[in-house]
């Protein structure tokens, strides 16, 4: 998903770089941040949570958007994002960093997932619930806020 977002931003003229959250050491040189991670067992990915805590002060000084992926069903369309387990962690991070917005996308769990509980879950809910077009449309909205319009 991060690659889809990066591609959409770049195609709109935004200088975007996709990085693994745990590899980032500084936000110097970045004018905006899009931070995302999977929702897993009702929690937002630990690298995303740690990134938001570590760089909270710096993130509050630039435009920030957050996203999470994870629902392995139709809960986004039937109940909305507020019904998705783990969304509260994303909301807390959004408040901490003064994010302009956050969103939740469908997730993916491969049938051959390794480790417990992923392997156990894969027996009943494996599948790809991501919607690339929806992800790209969301990213295009961010790009519209980051790229100045024609004068």
Image (tube, helix red, strand yellow):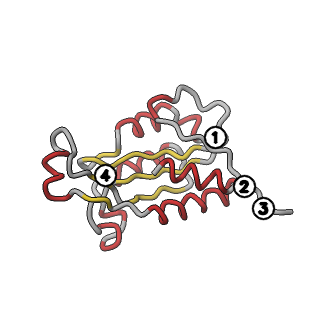
Residue 134 image point, x, y percent? 48, 65
Return the disc, 1 or 3, that comes first in the chain's sequence: 1
Residue tagged 3: 149
Residue tagged 2: 147
Tell me the crowding category of disc 2: few under 14, some 14 to 19, or many 20 or more residues within 10 angstroms, Cα based: few
Label pair 3/2, CB-CB below 8 angstroms: yes
Residue tagged 4: 86
Q: CA distance from mark 4 to mark 1?
A: 26 Å
Q: Nearer the viewer, mark 2 or mark 4?
A: 2
Q: Nearer the viewer, mark 4 or mark 1?
A: 4
Q: CA distance from mark 2 to mark 1?
A: 18 Å
Q: Residue furthest top?
A: 25
Q: Residue furthest bottom?
A: 78
Label pair 2/4, CB-CB below 8 angstroms: no
Residue tagged 1: 61
Q: CA distance from mark 3 to mark 4?
A: 36 Å
Which residue is drawn at the image coordinates 63% and 40% (left, top)? 61
Which residue is drawn at the image coordinates 33% and 62% (left, top)? 129
């Amino acid at each position: 998903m991060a690659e889809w977002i990066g591609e959409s931003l770049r195609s709109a003229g935004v200088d975007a770089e996709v990085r693994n959250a745990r590899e980032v050491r500084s936000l110097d040189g970045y004018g905006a941040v899009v931070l995302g991670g999977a929702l897993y067992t009702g929690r937002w990915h630990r690298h995303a949570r740690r990134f938001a805590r570590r760089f909270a002060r710096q993130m509050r000084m630039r435009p920030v958007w957050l996203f999470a992926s994870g629902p392995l069903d139709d809960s986004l369309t039937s109940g909305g994002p507020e019904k998705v387990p783990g969304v509260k962690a994303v909301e807390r991070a959004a408040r901490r960093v003064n994010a302009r917005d956050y969103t939740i996308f469908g997730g993916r769990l491969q049938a051959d997932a390794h480790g417990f509980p992923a392997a156990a879950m894969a027996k009943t809910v494996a599948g790809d619930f991501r919607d690339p077009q929806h992800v790209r449309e969301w990213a295009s909205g961010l790009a519209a806020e980051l790229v100045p319009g024609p004068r």
